[in-house]
Image (cartoon, rainbow, N blue to C red):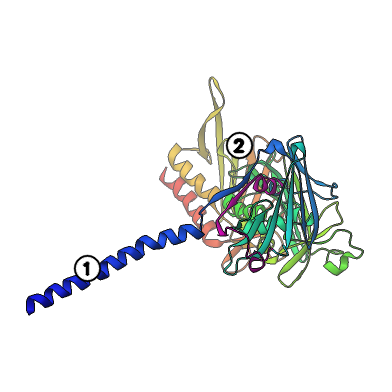
Amino acid sequence: MRKSWRLLSLFLILCVLSGALLLLRKKPAEETATRTEQFVLSEVTSAEMEKIVITSQKGTLVLKQENEAWRIEPEQPFAVDQFRLGLIASNFRRVNIDRVVDETGARRAEFGLDNPQAKAEVFLTGGRKLTFYLGARIPTGGGYYLMMEGDPRICTVVDSYGEYFLSTAADLRDKELPGIVGEEMTYFKLVRTGKPTIEVQKRDEAMIGLPFGHWAVTKPYQFPMGVRWEEFQTILNAIGALRIDEFIDDNPKDLSRYGLAKPTAELEMRDEKNTLHLFFGATVDGKTYFKQAGTPAVMAMQAEKLDFLKVKPFDLIFRFAYIVDIKKVDRIVIEGHGKTYDVTIEQIPVEGEEETTNQVFRVNGQKIDDEPFRQFYQVLIGMQVEGENDKTLAEKPEVRTVFYLNSGDERKVVVSYVPYNDDFYAVFRNGRSEFVIHREQVENMLDKLAALVAND
């Protein structure tokens, strides 16, 4: 009896496994009958295409190919996004299908194709024509239903086809702004209501004393300041990401309704080829109105893209109190702690190398070894300001340094350190003060100088 039960159990298990195997074999066959994966519904060559006419509830869009380039017909009074235009033409040249949902076309009404929401006619050479109909959107998203005239099958296509079929001329307006190449930039200006104007220009040889890089902050400060490139690059990256999100009014009668009669900000940038010049107005519901200089059209972009307008000029500059190449200096007079140090730097040309010199250093006539002096010089020119001066002070310095230069328009630079409060000095350069520096830096410089003279 026990053996019989074992045989019966084995028989039942085999039956179950056989049934499961039949189901697994049957399921793909059923799916194959109703679904065909990824195929080309229609394909022609670009040379065969002459015109595309797209008709929807939004209107009619006519695209015409001439000399291997597509344009909107009739010609529009605005710049057209040529990339998007070409993309539409390319997708009607080759229509890729995701799957077939109905081989016979009997279920047109179910898929919104008894009354299509859009039609696209592709006119070809020799009087031929291809016609496509766009049905409803797939309920689960991700695409639309589509048919081609002369083919009974109902297919699905990706979402982008819905955009192509429902496009208008206005949808093809170019939303890109003039591009500025950061490395080729020659001019930058940022004007904000209630904030100092920032101006950055490409450096010239007259801008002695600027460290590193090819650009200088020329406003709001009275003297050009070197640009901290990483910080400035962040601003340029943000500007490079700007684009038109919405076209508001091509011919506004009253700019004040957009806050553009008196703009809140102005941005101007130039490189060797292009100019970007924008005015920004009011911000409403998360979008900021703006316009390009020289054109009346009002546009909008997401306000969150404009955080760079809050930048402070102090954040963009190298903060050296005064920095200059040692080869450009002949003499430095340093006064402080009741003492005066007369530093001379003799520039000795290197034979056969026009731009190379060696230096001999002396303090109060006493010759100083090369390496110790260079270490002190790095301390002297390495002092960095730590904030902007918001006081009007008379120039009555406790410490004073005078640089005598051998090139450039400015041959004498006086840097004075005037008491600002118990912790800081106001830094004066040739009679004008814009920054403050911690007293410890100045005291450290004087201490290093005294030790240099004492130890030599």
Image location of residue 189, percent across then percent down: 74, 52
The answer to whether residue 52 is seen in the rendering is yes
- Is residue 299 left or right of 324 when viewed as pictured? right
Residue 226 belongs to the span the image colors magenta: no
Against 348, is 136 above or below? below
Q: Quadrant of the N terminus?
A: bottom left
Front in this rendered view, residue 421 or 253: 253
* First to last magenta residue range: 85-113
Front in this rendered view, residue 354 or 46: 46
At mark 2, the secondary structure is: helix
At mark 1, the secondary structure is: helix
Front in this rendered view, residue 230 or 340: 230
> What's under tag 2, amino acid-wise?
Lys
Task: Please tell me which of labels 2 and 1 falls first in the chain.
Answer: 1
- Which residue is found at the position 62% from the left and 65% from the top? 107
In the picture of the structure, the residue carrying the numbered disc 1 is 14
- Name the quadrant containing residue 428: bottom right
In the picture of the structure, the residue carrying the numbered disc 2 is 328
